[in-house]
Amino acid sequence: MTAGDDMEEDWARYGFSAELVKALFHGLRVGLYVVGHTGKILLVNPYAERLLDLPARRLIGADPHDLLHRNADGSLIPREDCQILAAFTEGVYVRSEEAWFIRGSGGLVPVGVMAAPLPLGGTNMGSVVLFYDLSRHKAVEHKQAVALAALEKLTDTLSLMAETSIVLASTLKVDEALRRLSRLVVPELADWAMIDLLGPGGRVDRVAVVVTRNGSGVERKQWEGPLPAFPDSSHTPTARVLRGGPAELFGPDDLAEWNDSGKCDVQRWRPYLELGAHSIIIAPLRTPRRVLGALTLARYKTSLAYDSADLSLIGDIASRAGLAVDNANMFEEQRRFASSTSHELRTPLAALRTRLEEAVLYPTEVDPLETIREARALTDRLETIIDDLLVSARLRAGEPDAYEPIDIRTLVVKEVAAMAGGVPVHVDADRDVNVLGSRIQLIRVIDNLLVNARRHADEKVEVTVGRVEGSAVITVCDDGSGIAPQDRERVFERFARLDEGRRREPGGTGLGLAISRDIAHAHNGTLTIEDSPRGARFVLRLPLTDRRS
């Protein structure tokens, strides 16, 4: 028996065979290289070639540290800091859960590594290194991290929305609720925020400005207060949003272009001008019936710019705020309505009761026919008040009505022609002034304005109908004593009647102008009182079906 035969018997004792050695070398899906006592690679297996995208001839004889070992960013690891090299230089066993090898193509591959010292005879010491691909594992980790981040973001969003609802429901005072909302979104979603509410006649009231400071929101009350209405010609983002447009997002380039074009109004955009912004979102405080205001959030360069997901989230928050404002307004309005209605109904009811009780107590002294006539008159007044209240309630509830194309010139001319006697009414109306609306409701507005103007006019009433920048504009002017500026909004309140009105029409309900404004709002328009050289000047604006000027 030869020495070779003895060696084969020794290998066989350990279970080795030629087929098994071949399978281990060629079929093992783990990279293998062996380092000799000189620190150079002596041997590699085929899987190492494929994983490293390097042929065996490039690997054998090379220093594995210089050729392969890298940091995660691709930089070379100092030899004294290389854990894998320690198996050779220090003769210790090494295991690394994550290391990086550079491939022949220049890319990095994450690997798990096991390295052990390897005696090579005598005092010579090398090492054997096994490594395996972690790419698939890293991909799974990445997916899990992305999913976890998305879940955390969703949880944060749901938590924020819940907190938003709690804040908005915590008080029925509109200004306080919106200030609390501003302090919630700053610095959670923005570096500064402001909230504008639409007032009568398109006037804007800035109710909250909050700026981040030391990780919390600080109010800037000096920037709050009334602002002028946007002119019809304004096409600024806030004006578009307040007119019913969707939420808008502006990045750094948009803001630079916007500022350079002169679109940035100094008074309205003082926070932007003084604080600056890298990204802005303007979202409408909207209800199903109308837009109540706008929420503006801004971020500095130190924060991430807003994206479409932020636009959707902030739009949702603004909608919730709009509903909260609407609910608070409705609550306050219902409270005033109940108080006013009780008073207005109690007066004729008390008079009716008095007349009837007099007739019962003093039958011989009271003329029954006169009592019946007075009772009928009081009943008619009650019926008128109730009818007007029902109309007002339907309008405020946003009950749908049949809308149709309406030629405003024709409608106005017909209503003026139907008025017999009294103060003359002169009409100057452009042609082709068309709106979409309820004919019955718009007739009621025109009639209310004409009757009101004739009641207060001295000699004449003038009515004009025209087109102004996308709106049908109907003005009704009288030459009477006019309405003082401080009373121009009060006359639109329910049951509000000035002394002049009570004197000229004692039996009025005080609901006509309130209903007229509600009808204007239901048609996405406005009804206001504007300056006039003499008398009162009522202006009704309605969207044209054809928006050309």
Image (cartoon, rainbow, N blue to C red):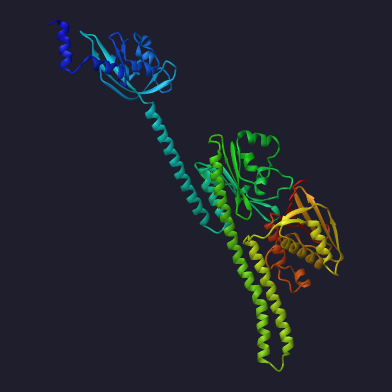
Give how far across and how far down residue 281 sits, in percent.
59, 42
| Front residue of this view, candidates 343 and 380 | 380
Work out whether 384 lies above or below 278.
Answer: below
Give how far across and how far down residue 252 sits, in percent.
61, 34
Give how far across and how far down residue 182 sits, in percent.
55, 48
Give how far across and how far down residue 276 sits, in percent.
61, 37
Q: Is residue 309 left or right of residue 140?
A: right
| Residue under the image location 37 percent in, 9 percent down | 57
| Front residue of this view, candidates 484 and 464 | 464
Q: Is residue 355 left or right of residue 432?
A: left
Kindly tell me whether residue 77 is visible in this rendering: no
Kindly tell me whether residue 454 is visible in this rendering: yes
Q: In the figure, residue 211 lies in which quadrant?
A: top right
Q: Is residue 431 left or right of residue 75?
A: right
| Residue under the image location 36 percent in, 15 percent down | 49
Query: Number of labelled discs?
Result: 0
| Front residue of this view, candidates 109 and 488 | 109
Work out whether 274 lies above or below 415.
Answer: above
